[in-house]
Amino acid sequence: MKCVFFCHALTSCWNNGNAHFLRGIARELSELGHQVVVYEPADGWSRLNAIRDGGEGSLQEVAGLLAGIDIRQYVTSPDLEQALQGADLVMVHEWNAPELIRDLGRYRILGAPFTLLFHDTHHRAVTAPEQLEQFDLDGYDGVLAFGEVLRQIYLRLGWANRAFTWHEAADVRLYRPHPEIERTHDVVWIGNWGDGERNAELNEFLIRPVFELGLHSRIYGVRYSLDALRAIDAAGIEYCGWLPAHRAPAAFARARATVHVPRGPYARSLPGIPTIRMFEAMACGIPVVSAPWDDAESLFPDGSYLRAGNGDQMKEMLLTLFRDPDLAASLTSTGLQTIAKRHTCRHRAIELVGIVNSLRGAQHPASSAHLEGALQ
């Protein structure tokens, strides 16, 4: 099967958490024998900022991770006649221009034989629905939503006739334990400050507990406000700037624990959707203590991570975790088993092929739109 992806950036993960997952999907599809071609704008803001922060070298490192994946960059707009030639699957991420999303749909309406899927991994459906309403999805065969609640929103609002739950997952070819790396500090947090969706949560569940416990900690990420940087410095936390995704496993390996702090819109309005770091941290074998979120789809079993209802509980759980090596080992083991059993990019690649086959009327179509855990 020839798979053609349109995304904002596969080569850059600067403020672009989708790149982690899509790289893994592209590699797994290639390993399964499919041809993968990826189109991204050469002047996308993620690429330009990655070059500014890390130089061309950071992107060259990524290129080495994507052997066998045909990545094609375009200026202004891609040549769709050429891009779609021979395509069996076309997958379009929601971080694309509305005009490109519309034009791809028109090809399908006019009879192009490929399966066309729209991939949504954002909270705009509840925080800025007017932005999604501008997308013309009439020609699309279906929507890939990274949570069941988001899938239901698409169907309820009439934005799509078919929608499938397709969660993110860990790229375990990259995200894995590194026992040879010495643990040199207590807590690591890898994430972006963003547009203020979780300012209060980061202060309550990360900065204040680390400060009050006197933990040796590091924070990686971008788009931190001056006030945020001052608070981090005042708490004695080392701010380390942008960390390319392929270097995150080593950063996890150097710490004794990490904290999961979901963005407010997900925690409040989109239950069942964690950040991708939840999958990746578990895959790296680091214990996770999470701020509140509703695991409405039972993605992670009891014993795979610790839950803190407020900042005081976060302090208590971190302290307990550091004093109890057996608890830390149990969390690590259960987390690793959970990812290996249910949440790898290989699982999601096979689910994607199943969705395409069901839409194309394969001999053995998928029986349900919700294909989570297809390999269990």
Image (tube, helix red, strand yellow):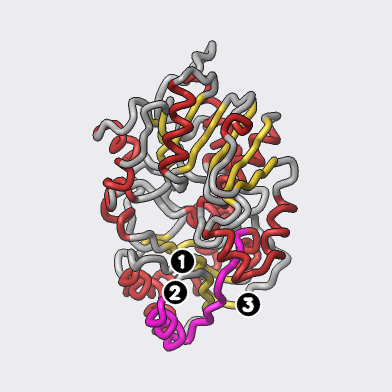
Q: How far apart are the alpha carbons under marks 2 and 1?
A: 7 Å
Q: Is residue 31 left or right of residue 142?
A: right
Please give the label number shown on residue 184.
3
Q: Earlier in the sequence, mark 2 or mark 1?
A: 1
- Is residue 173 a member of the stretch shown in magenta? no
The crowding category of the residue bearing disc 1, from other C-alpha atoms within 10 Å (few below 14, some 14 to 19, many at least 20), is: many
Q: Amino acid at mark 3?
A: Thr
Q: Earlier in the sequence, mark 3 or mark 2?
A: 3
Q: Is the residue under label 1 in contact with that under label 2 (CB below 8 Å)?
A: yes
Sequence-first tag of 3 and 1: 3
Tell me if residue 338 can be seen.
no
SS class, disc 1: loop
Mark-to-mark CA distance, 3 and 2: 24 Å
What are the residue bounds of the magenta stretch? Answer: 225-245
* Left or right: where 288 falls relative to 266: right
**Is residue 243 shown above or below 375?**
below
Q: Quadrant of the N terminus?
A: top right
Residue bearing the label numbered 1: 192
Amino acid on which the number 2 mark rests in the picture: Tyr
Q: Element under label 3?
A: loop
